[in-house]
Image (cartoon, rainbow, N blue to C red):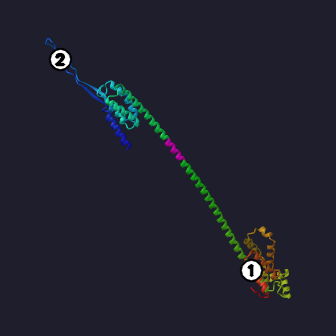
Amino acid sequence: MRKLQEQQRQQQMRQLAGSIIQPSVTPGTPAQFAEESDGNVMIGQMPTAARTSMQIDPQRLAALAALSDNPLAALKTVSEIVPGLRQAGLTTGGPMQMDNPFDIYVTDQTLPQNLRNVAQQYSRSFANGTLPPDKVDERIRQIGESAQRAATNAESMKLREQQMKQSLELAKSQQEMTRILGEGQQALAQQGLELRQEQFAEQQRVRQEKQSEELAKRDDAKSQLDTTLRQMKRNYDTLLQEGAIVSTEASTMENIGARASVSGTGRAVGAAVGSKAEQQRQTIEQTRPLLLNLIKNATGMSAQQMNSNAEMQLYLNAATNPTLGYEANLEAMANLDRLFGTGEIAKDIEKQLQSSKARTGRSKW
């Protein structure tokens, strides 16, 4: 659109430029004759030939100026040269014919309204003949200078407006950038908080999983401890059935025989002949490392803590020593189960010791 308007403006300027200078024809005059008193005819005036000259149309010149890139500056220049052209007789109509030179300012929409009002007053004065010819050029010069100042002021104001607009846009841009940065910082802070919360939640989850695994491991160790103690109980019941362990419910002779079988010589003979009683004793003694490991897993104690736990060592030694009495072994196993197992074996042992009598060759289990 802008390119089309520029092309149209240039075309109008070319058309006006070709019509600014126009030929002016001054017709010739024939010879005039006068008759003398003596009857002779004499030429009173010599004939003149027609003359053609070139003259400039000031209105078209002003119109061309109005189409220029800087109309106000061009009109000022026109206002300065037109008076000289008129005086030289180079404008259309000759020096005596003057078009209204103020009309171009009246119709120029680029001029401020107050300047166009002044030009309109001069135009009326010029048309009415109340503006002396010697004042016309002065008024045109004044309007041209005022138009130039107006153009300069307009450019300055436009420049100030552009600068103010740029300043406002810059301030707005800075505010927007500040807002974006603030939002970005808030977003980063929020993301950091969320990340820390996720990390904390993950740590809690891992910790809970470890605790759950540890609890499950301990529960499993307690169950295995119960199973192991129950198997040891069967071993001791077998010894009781074989009469190979001292019991408070056995007779004196039975206890003497049982004591003899657990002596060094008795165990050596039993091992040599492969007695069932000696096999049970060896199985019980070999269970000690397994019980230690199960207690460690069931409690989470370290090896040093287990070594320093005198109560546990006492019960462990008693439970895995088949040279002690039957009831003493059962009491030690019950204590181990109460401290480190599920407590079920302890309940059964306590019930047996309180409600029934162990008899030789018979077990309530």
Q: Is residue 295 left or right of residue 101?
A: right
Where is mark 1, residue-wise? 345
Q: Disc 1 on helix, strand or loop?
A: helix
- Find residue 56 and report its image quarter: top left
Of residues 125 and 230, the one nearer the viewer is 125
Q: Quadrant of the C terminus?
A: bottom right
Question: Can residue 177 be seen here?
Answer: yes
| Residue plotted at (38% across, 42% down) | 3
Q: Indicate the quadrant where residue 190 lies.
A: bottom right
Check disc 1: other Cα within 10 Å, few if <14, some if 14-19, many if 20+: many
Q: Position of residue 254 (x, y in %)?
A: 84, 87
The quarter holding residue 17 reads top left
Camera-nearest residue between 86 and 357: 86
97 falls in the magenta region? no
Estimate how packed mark 2 is, as few (under 14), some (14 to 19) or many (20 or more) residues with alpha carbons within 10 Å. few
- Where is residue 201 drawn, in percent x and y? 63, 63
Residue 168 lies in the magenta-colored region = yes
Q: Tag 2, which secondary structure?
A: strand
* Residue 94, horizontal then vertical, whole percent: 29, 26
Q: Amino acid at mark 1?
A: Ile
Judged by its main secondary structure, the magenta piece is helix
Which residue does the numbered mark 2 point to in the structure image?
33
State the extent of the magenta-drawn residues as a range. 164-174
Which is more toward the observer, 330 or 78? Answer: 78
Say above or below: 154 vs 138. Answer: below
